[in-house]
Image (cartoon, rainbow, N blue to C red):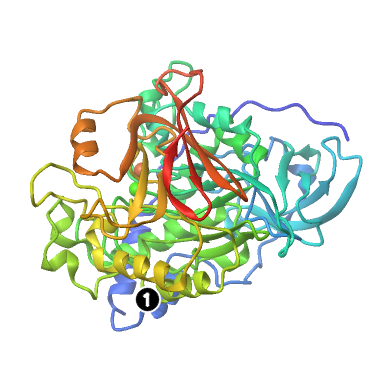
Amino acid sequence: MALPGRTGRPASALAPTPYDAELRAAARHVSRRRFLTVTGAAAALAFSTGLPARGAFAAPRLEAARITEDPFTLGVASGDPLPDSVLIWTRLAPAPFTPDGGLGQQQVEVAWEVALDASFAQVVRSGTALAHPEYAHSVRADVRGLDPATTYHYRFRTGAWISPAGRTRTAPAGGDDVTRLRLAAVACQAYHDGYYTVYRHLAREDVDVVFHLGDYLYEYAVNSAGGARNYTDRVLPSVFNRETMTLADYRMRYALYKSDPDLRAAHAAHPFVVTWDDHETENNYAAEHDENGSDPALFLARRAAAYRAYWENQPLRAGQLPDGPDARLYRRLHWGTLAQFDVLDTRQYRSDQAYDDVPHAPGPESDDPVRTLTGDAQERWLLDGWASSGALWNVMPQQVCFSQRRLDLDAEAKLSMDAWDGYRASRGRLVAGAKQTGVDNWLVLTGDVHVAYAFDIKDDFDDPASATVGTELTCTSVTSGRDGTQRPANWDTYMRANPHLRFYDGRRGYLRMELNRENARADFRTVPAVTTPGAAVSTAASFVTEAGAPGLTPV
Ligand code: FE
Ligand code: CA
């Protein structure tokens, strides 16, 4: 098949449109109906924000031959590998920095194919899908009937345009006593804080799957120079220079992020398993509470827009499609008998932060046992999943620091009220559940903090002699926090205040892990700078934890 030449990125100027008025109207509509349940409010939102009801696809069909600019500007992605299936994704946007992506309100038919080889000589599955304007012309195919533990190549085509090819991999069969799994974990990729050098390196790693632990995008304004990227060769449209509030804002912000070739390369190279943290919606929100104490009805309108755009722009299955401001993002995946992954959502169901979300010593407000970080349903789901797990490694990819982190050396040290430290009863129920279910080899993967940490998870964090019950690793950030330093100013304090903290590095990077039947090895991969492109990657430190013997050992 002949490949049309790539076109340059269109520099479309954007006419101002009344998004704010639209959001305010949606919120007013919800406010009038606050007596309704959240689900009722969701239905009202779907109406008042102009989102169609599911299945309402009345738009006319656009002849694919009439697409005159490359529609595959946002790349491809795959995700959530199962033994017989993987989800493949793209989104058509010949003019990505405009609200409709340049395709108006028309549907577009897209063909997809999955092959065993990179030249697509051995196509094993193919089909067509419709890109709907209601879903921002995103396209996804839940490709079934694949073989387990197999590498595949995939691509999309519409009219004369063909997408970049992606590579993906299915999970091993359910009972397969797999001997090895290689994974990576990333989080926190503020576009305006630097270049995606970390992704350029990650694209070249030999890993089976990548976990994204949240802050895939940030809601903050991005100026015409791209913030710390300090562009001199392009001018970003002014539409990015304000906080994301509406569905159109969030959609365009994903387009901005995915305009970065290194991010597209990482998605094309590996399947991703994604979960969100706060910034995909708004800094440090908790359920229906935003950080400024806005009317929850107003914030839920915004959350619905943010969740919708997230789903449209990620390789997620239909089961994660939001219903207004609600989405079932927590989910379980397996890697044969080697690993079970319990992917959490610690934002959507959490109690509001204690003590106005400023660092605070634990007290009656933060320690109230009715408070929860997961919500009751997710907590039960997790504990039930542990009880029935037959996996050697039980991995919990999630967002905020699980282990206790004393922020100073005072006897009554302050803790972060946004992390599990602000929800100690909730954390205690998981630690108790881990012991009670006898879950094997508990491994927590964490984002959010923009630094690399390795923790021994203690039965009692205030007693260094208490049992180690699991391992937590934080993956630092891709860019957030800009370049960072190896030893931040609080390094000595944190290391002394937290004896179970085994490693702390303040630079950008990603976590690379290998799990086998004997042990799990973690490599903290790091780059010295992200505000200038092209930095080299190196391993700052490596640790091993032995199967059956929790606790980290440096290697
Ligand atoms: Fe972050
Ligand atoms: Ca965060």
Q: Where is residue 22 drawn, in percent x and y? A: 37, 59
Q: Nearer the viewer, residue 134 or 320?
A: 320
Q: Where is residue 384 drawn, in percent x and y? A: 49, 75
Q: Quadrant of the N terminus?
A: top right
**Residue at position x 54%, y 32% from top?**
199
116 displayed left or right of 285: right
Q: Secondary structure at mark 1?
A: helix
Number of disc labels: 1
Q: Residue furthest top?
A: 232
Q: Is residue 393 above or below residue 320?
A: above
For the question of whether residue 68 can be seen, the reply is yes
Residue for badge 1: 376
461 displayed left or right of 300: left
For the question of whether residue 91 can be seen, the reply is no
**Residue at position x 23%, y 66% from top?**
295
Q: Where is residue 102 drawn, in percent x and y? A: 60, 43
Picture quarter containing residue 3?
top right
Q: Is residue 73 above or below residue 85?
A: above
385 displayed left or right of 495: right
